Image: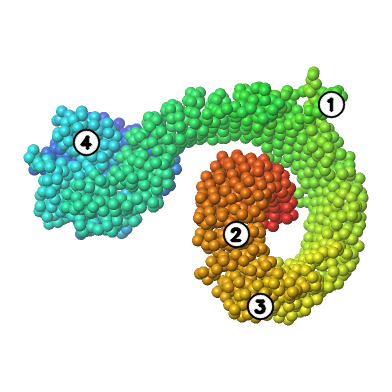
Amino acid sequence: MQPPFQNDDLDMEAAVASARPQLVEFLSHHLGWLLTTSRHFLPGMALNGLDGITDHREKASVLLDLLEKAGPATWKQFAQYLCMECDLPLDLEILLISSAGEGNFSQKQEAGTDVSARPSVPKGFAGRRRHRSSSVSDKDVKQQRLDSAEKYRHLLIDSMRQRYGSRRAAGAAAQEQTQPLAFSQAFVNLVIRHSKASHLKERMDKPRQDVAGAPEPEECADTAVKVSDLFCSVVPSGTTKVIFLFGKPGTGKTMLMHRICQKWAEGVLPQFLFTFLFEFRQLNLLKRKLTLKELLFDLFLQPEDSPDAVFQNLLENAWRTLIIFDGLDEFAANMDLSSSSKGGPTLTSHMSISELFVDLCHGKLLPGCTVLVTSRPKRLPNFLLNTVEFLLAEIWGFDHEKVEEYVSHYFHQYSFKEQAIAHLKNNTKLLSMCLIPALCYVVCVCLEYLLLKHQRSVELPQTMTQFYIKMLLIFINKQQGEHADGEATQLNCNKKAILGLCDLALKGLEDKKLVFYVGDIPEHVKEFASLHGLLTVFEVKTSGTCPEAGYAFVHLSLQEFFAALCLMVSRRVDKNYLKKKFSLKSKWTLKNEAKTEFMESFHIFLSGLSSKECRTFLMLLAEQDEAWVQDKQDTILQSLKKLAATHLTGPKVIELCHCTFETQDLKVAQHIGSLLNFKYEFKNFRLTPLDMSALVFVINSGQDLTYLDFAGCLMDIDSLEVLSGCNNIEHLSFRSRRCGDDFASALSKSLRGMGSLKKLELTGGSITAEGMTNLVQASSQCLQLEEINLQDNRIRDPEVKRVMDLFSRMEKLKKIDLSNNDLSLNAVLILAKEVIACQNAAELRVRKDTVMIYFSGPSGKVPRSLDLRWEERKEHVIPTRRVKLCLQDRSLSSQHAKEIVAILQSCPCLSEVDLSGNKLGDEGCSCLLESLPWIPISKQLDLSQNCLSVNGICSLLKSVNTCQKMMEVQVSLCHETAVLRFTENGEFASLPPREEPVFSPDDQQYGEENQTPTASKKIRLTDSHFQASDLEKLYAVLKECSSISELDLSNNYLGDKGLLQLFQFLPNLKMLSSLKLNDNQISLNSVFFLAQSLSTLEHIKRMNLSLGHRQVVHLTFWERIRVRSTSRWRSSFLAHPKHVAAGRCFRLRDCRVGPEDVTRLCQILAQCPQLTEIDLSGNSLSDQSIERLLSFLPYLCHLTLLSIRNNTFSPRCTALLINSINLCGRIRMVEVRSSENAFLHLGASVRSQKTSCRLTDCAIGQGQIDELCRVLEQRGWLAEVDLSRNQLGDEGLRCFLDRLHRVPVTCSLNLSHNRISQDGVLHLINAFATSGNTAEVQVSLCSKATLIIKLTSRDDPRKILRLAECNFQPEHLEKLCLLLEKCTGLTEYISSNNNVTVQAAERLLHSLRKNLGLLKMSIEEPWVCKESVTNLLELAVQACGNITEITICKDKTLFQLGVRFPHCLEKVESAVSRLNLYKPEIKHACFYQRVREKCAQLQELRWSHVELHNDEAEMLVKILLPLPELKKFGLTSSSIMPTGIDYLIMGLQNCQAIEELNLGHMKLSGAAVPKLVLALCEMPSLKRLILNHNSIGNDGCSRLTEALRNMHYLEEINLSHNKIGDPGLMNLAAVLLKMQNLKRIDLSGNSPSPAGGEKLMGALACCQRIEELLLSRNVFGDRTAVELALRLPHMTNLKILHLQNNNIGPAGGMKLTRALVVCGLLEEISLSENDLGEGSIHALSEGLPRFEHLRKIDLKLCGITDDASKSLSHGFRQCPSMEEIILSWNALGDGGARELAGALPGMEKLKMLDLEKNRIGACGATKLAEQLAKCPEIQFIR
């Protein structure tokens, strides 16, 4: 109830009407009294009809009606009597008294009313009855109370008018003129919007604003409201109403509160009797606790008298009381639920401000009052969100209209008012600032000052900080008037006061102090601030005593500005303190706990002060040089950059953008933009135009395109106008129910300015068809736009035709999303028609509420058919456009079938049509299928889930015959699947259906000459569980489908009977290539029937059967060619069987068959012609069954492979399998693995060929050796016996070796992993020493456990013993030496890590000898690398015979000797006599004499990684190098005395017979080359020169060519990794022209240019015998590659080509790979680490079939894709010698892996496949693994 404010003007009727609801409520509880009293005022007849009314409220209302109708006099008397007798609520009593008047009723009583006749007073009025005699005094008390309240109310009104109204004191008015935010300006209404409490709760619960809220209902969207509307909401009686107004800094919250107080004082808010205003910044000063009465009276306004009566009246009129709390964000204390008083407050309870505030909001104090709270948006206590029902609204500030209104008022007295307005309107940034009232005032102040000074040229500041500085300077300047000096002078004069004000501001923020007393402010500061309107003064009341004067900055942001300025100019503030103060972290650690500072805009001002434009101002104020100021500014800028690299929420990103904008530093903005991950996500908070301006500044400053995502963000239309200037937006997204048609219209105007926009999203909004049309109209002008998403709006029935017409103009458009817009079925069908008509539309995808349209973009050239026969026929050109149409789950029925057919027939370029999930049924689908020949679908039609029956399926199958382009039908009743697939071949699509013609002989002959494969057709009719009656219908249809190639009837319960019926018409299916009948519940009888069909149906190629858990019946047939015979008169078709080039296969798995079943099966299979493979895996065959099976082998004449896997074999069974080599002479290999898997490979004839037996992991022990050997002895030609991974042990090995001599064969015996010990090895060596047919023994007892024996039956001079890691003990080594002494035919002995000590090695060397010829001895032991060269030579001379080779490789711990027998001393006399010349200088003459004698026939000397001391180097130079027969010398990676290299090279001059010289890795420099040249000149027979990994350089290379010029026999040059550039390379090229015998050259890892490379290639063309060209890592480039391509025809002997990492691109790669085909002998190609391009790979692939000898190809890091791998894999298929393929670090995916896997089975010699670091997934890896198992030699896979 809202009684009028002016009681004097009320008439009685209005009073009764306003008081009636409350009066009825009161009297309904005292109905008896009312009835009795009414009889005194109304006639008795008027009350007769009341008995029938039972409801008390209704009866009271009727009585009041009767009293009103009785007339005004009666009503006044009743009202007066009621007020005197009843204890009414005070407000109701006041209203009744004022309407009825006072004294009338008492006069009536005095006139003779019978008071005694009054009715008895009810219980509720007992108090009044007892004090009847004193009624006049009660009235006086009540009236006195009313008078006091009324008097206090008028006192409040006067106080409000004085403070905030127009009648202020003159002094206050004078002060206003200088205050920046004075009220002298006319008030302009603010923009206020209702907000959602639930939405704010979500924001506060998620302070990081990371999660967008759910789409909001439209009715909950924020709406604009007036101030008066805030107080008009209806709440239950007695309920406290809380209104929470929040707004950003400067939006006018405090000004609005003052305005409300002013308007209340003027009578505009009559619903409130009392209004109080408290500012939290003043409440912060209170340190004591208060009662509610003290809060209202002591702190706001004390009543002049009767405070208790006033307070009591206030309590009774709580619902008419307004209490305003301004600036909750400025409250320094905590505010949470704990602030509420415990146990219920009382009116006399003393509480803190927090407790008073909380209890007022909860209604515990002054219940029913209205509490109005203002705050900045980041501070909202939990109790308001969770426990109080409150009205939430946000103050937005101004909009454009309000800005213009404010500016008009501000400049109303100036002639340049219109100029000022125009200036703001034309500047978007300034206009955005002015939307915040406080900034609008600052802008107006600056604009006024500048326009007064410079009428024509006005240049305003750019940032908020610059405006504040300008405002400060203007205020200072205004006081000086016309005599004012320059700004710098004025600043210097007031510097002390300004700095004092800065200190005050910063100290206040740090101490949470926003109000200052007189003693807090220095006098000069106070005078300055008050004079210039920077501080405001007001009364501060902390108790009922006299108030004090309080000072505060006119706005908190002004205090923040001066605090920031303090940090930048104070000498006390260093960098660390500045960094600490500059932070964008949350101002609140918890929602209800404030940090130590009130700094909302503080960091923004700090950023603004770090701009270059503020540098001069700071220098003047700080009295410092530019470097000092810039150092501080750089600190802020660096902190900003670091902040951008951290994880920031949406609001923090906006704050960061504001800070960046304030700096006006484009480099900083660009850096920050690059760190924000190119995506800006803003969720669930409001963005102002000023926010958008800052954001656009950062985005536009960057060089990268960005993604803007606004989810649930509140923004006005003005913000969109700011976005129009953003050029770097690539993806723009809005998600909010607030986005309606107006929003879409405003956005449409901004789209043109976004030149980079590719994707636009407006989802979850309220856009209708009209809004969509406007948006699309504007979008059609954005030619770069690729995607528009309008899902989840309110579009419903769009203007389809107009919209699609607009879409067709957008060349780059790819996708439109209209999902979840409640489109009707009619709208969808219209959309389908228009999409088909739209030339650039590619796909319409509709599924339930999902609606998406895809576009193809600009059309390209129309490709022609690849078939050359149709090249000249334009009607067969395939159009590029392919349209996909998907209408799923839209309840399409048979009634829509004709309309759908019409739509489909209207499009000549359909690729896919999906009508699944509808209700077409048999009738609708039949209608569609009848028209199918005239519907141009090129890929597939999906009719799944359309309620099809068997009859419908038959219609589908019939379409195979009626529609020539049909390729596949896939149907399943159980899964409700029905899919038809079509061929894209234009030839078949164009042929009409016709009958099969009769051929004439001539036509047949002509047709055979023109064979053309026809389109294969497939029928997959699975998982349908047909009944017997259904099968008859289906078979009748299938019988007519003679053109099908694949038929799948799996999982249909056919049974034996159904299978038999099917095979009756199977011969009719002439083109059938595959038949699947899986899971059809067949029995073993059907297996025999199917096996029999191999004989009766000659076209069956492979039969795969399984009766296991999942039944398998899969038959494949020989390919038959459908040919067309073309005569002069007609065309016709006939099926011809393809020539049977390979055999047939029968597989039966997982079927338990007994011996009799095996016999019957074998009898059937024996009658089958061309049966080459039988697989009987997993059938649990017994020994007897296998014996019967093996007995049939001679009768299976064409069999090549018998496989029995997953079948446990007994030892007897294993013996039977091995003995099969004696039962059937065609067997070439018997393999048994793990006693479970057996494979018998058979040859084509019984010709004498070697046979292999492999019995691995079959638990064969000593007991089975005799029987095994008897079997093997019967077979004369054995190539291999593999008994690895068995259990022979030493005794089994001994037994086997004893009978080995009876096997007169040449073969390999593998006995690895048989638990052999050192004793067994010694026994083997004994057999090896005494056996005449054992050529080689290889033993290793480490984890490899290798034991291989190679036997030979012919005279083979080789006899090799290899022993590795045998862990021999001294006793074993002694026995070994004794055994080796007997082995006089040994040619090679290799010992590796066998615990052979130096002493044991010496003993071995004495033991190893032979009668005649060469013996090579190798020892690898750790001690080799520790012994000196001298010690190793001393060991070498212990060997018997003449030493021909000494190899010492310490890196490999290898010591190797070559010895010739017999030992001849007489041949070396001349050499010894020549060496005696050096005898006086050589110590240890006896040892060196021995070396001379033993090494006189030395031919090879190779030392690596040795350390030569002086005496060893001297011995090398003076004894070993001059040896007359030395032909090969190598010293690599070794260290020698400092002068040793020169000494060594001088010694090389004596090596006149040398043919190979290797000095690699010897650190040779160019200085050593001249001496080396002298030595080389003495080596006329040199064939190989190896100087790799030295530092020869250009000069050294040039000098080296002097010696090479005369080396006509040179076959190899290795100068790799020698820092040789173009000069050296060109000199070398000049020499190469004459090297006709050169076969190998290695120049890898040097530093030539392409020019040098071209010169080299030209010279190499003259080396026609070149076989190996190694030029890796030279960065030759395309020029060299092209030159090499031109020279390759001259290098026909080339075998190895390495061009790794040579910067060869697509151009050079293409030329090179095409030219390689001339090198037919190539064995190894490496083009790795070159960006060759797909064209080069294709060219290389085409040439691969020419390389019959190719063993290795390396294409690592060549950028090979799946597409390129197809041709590459095709080429690999034709490389039979391939051993190693490296394709690592490329871009191969599953597709490429599948292609490669298909090529693997043909590469039988493949050993290594490297696919590391590609994109191959599980699917591709599985396919590779399957095919790699078919590569028998594979060793390494990565």
Residue 1489: assigned label: 3
Q: Amino acid at mark 4?
A: Glu
Figure quadrant of the N terminus: top left
Q: Amino acid at mark 2?
A: Cys
The kind of secondary structure element at disc 1 is: helix
**Residue at x 71%, y 43% (from the top left corner):** 1745
**Which label's residue is closer to the chain start, 4 or 3?**
4
Crowd around label 2: few <14 · some 14–19 · many ≥20 (10 Å):
some
Q: In front: mark 3 or mark 1?
A: 3
Q: In front: mark 3 or mark 2?
A: 2
**Which label's residue is closer to the chain start, 4 or 1?**
4
The kind of secondary structure element at disc 2 is: loop
Q: Tell me which corner region of the image, top left, top right, bottom left or bottom right, holds residue 455.
A: top left
Q: Position of residue 636 (x, y in %)?
A: 29, 52
Q: CA distance from mark 2 to mark 4?
A: 88 Å
Residue contact between numbered discs 3 and 2, judged by CB atoms under 8 Å: no
Q: Nearer the viewer, residue 1310 or 1178?
A: 1310
Q: Amino acid at mark 3?
A: Gln
Q: Amino acid at mark 1?
A: Gln
**Which label's residue is closer to the chain start, 3 or 2?**
3
Give the residue number, with chain letter if any, for mark 4: 459
Give the residue number, with chain letter if any, for mark 2: 1577
**Which label's residue is closer to the chain start, 1 or 2?**
1
Residue 1004: assigned label: 1
Figure quadrant of the C terminus: bottom right
**Which label's residue is closer to the chain start, 3 or 1?**
1
Query: On the rendered structure, is 346 left or right of 105?
Result: right
Q: Position of residue 139 (x, y in %)?
A: 16, 45
**Residue at x 77%, y 35% (from the top left corner):** 1045
Q: In front: mark 2 or mark 4?
A: 2
Q: CA distance from mark 3 to mark 2?
A: 30 Å
Q: In front: mark 4 or mark 3?
A: 3
